[in-house]
């Protein structure tokens, strides 16, 4: 399993890399476990039946090895998924902090803009009153 590409700059890149690694791991194993059927033997049967039973220890060992490999790959994928989850969580926390600071900055700008708009409106009312008072006698 590759561990050299764990820095999260964009979660989509990490997800793509993780999917690629999982696909690569899955192509390296045989997804079908082949089990050779063995006729069950009862203890009370005669000795000739027990002599005819062929025990294939090599395939049993091979089956155990395949099971171990499947467990190892599953553990690696679980660890990779956990690392991805942790990195994604860290990325989201960082993005939330950035978003919170952006919202705070925008709220401050909004307060300043509202204050300027209120001041401009007061000046417009003063100009209007001054014009009406100064030129009010010229009305027809």
Image: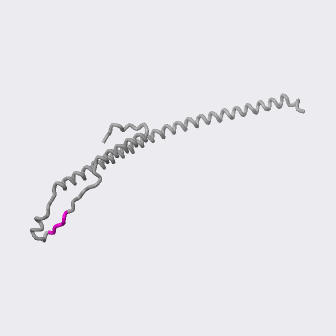
Q: Which residue is drawn at 24% across and 56% down?
A: 34
Q: Which residue is drawn at 38% across and 37% down?
A: 7
Furthest residue in direction left, as rendered: 47
Residue 136: percent from the left, percent from the top? 86, 31
Q: Residue at x 57, y 36 (%)?
A: 106
Q: In this view, does 35 lie to the left or right of 105?
A: left
Q: Is residue 28 left or right of residue 56?
A: right
* Quadrant housing the C terminus: top right
Residue 120: percent from the left, percent from the top? 70, 32
Residue 62: percent from the left, percent from the top? 20, 53
* Quadrant housing the N terminus: top left
Front-most of 105 and 23? 23
40 in magenta: yes
The relative height of residue 21 versus residue 134 in the rendered view (above or below) is: below
48 in magenta: no
* Residue 40 location, quadrant: bottom left
Magenta stretch, main secondary structure, is loop
Q: In this view, does 131 lie to the left or right of 71?
A: right
Q: In this view, does 76 lie to the left or right of 119?
A: left
Q: Residue at x 31, y 47 (%)?
A: 27
Residue 9: percent from the left, percent from the top? 42, 37
Residues shaded magenta: 38-42
Furthest residue in direction top, as rendered: 134
The relative height of residue 37 versus residue 81 in the rendered view (above or below) is: below
């Amino acid at each position: 399993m590759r561990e050299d590409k764990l820095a999260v700059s964009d979660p989509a890149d990490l997800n793509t890399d993780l999917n690629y690694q999982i696909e690569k791991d899955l192509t390296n194993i045989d997804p079908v476990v082949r089990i050779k059927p063995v006729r069950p033997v009862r203890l009370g049967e005669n000795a000739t039946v027990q002599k005819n039973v062929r025990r294939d220890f090599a395939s049993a060992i091979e089956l155990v090895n395949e099971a171990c490999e499947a467990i190892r790959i599953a553990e690696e994928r679980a660890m990779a998924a956990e690392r991805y989850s942790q990195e994604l969580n860290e990325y989201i926390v960082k993005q939330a902090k950035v978003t919170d600071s952006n919202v705070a900055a925008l709220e401050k700008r909004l307060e300043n803009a509202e204050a300027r708009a209120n001041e401009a409106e007061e000046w417009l009312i003063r100009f209007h009153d001054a014009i009406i008072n100064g030129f009010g006698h010229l009305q027809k």
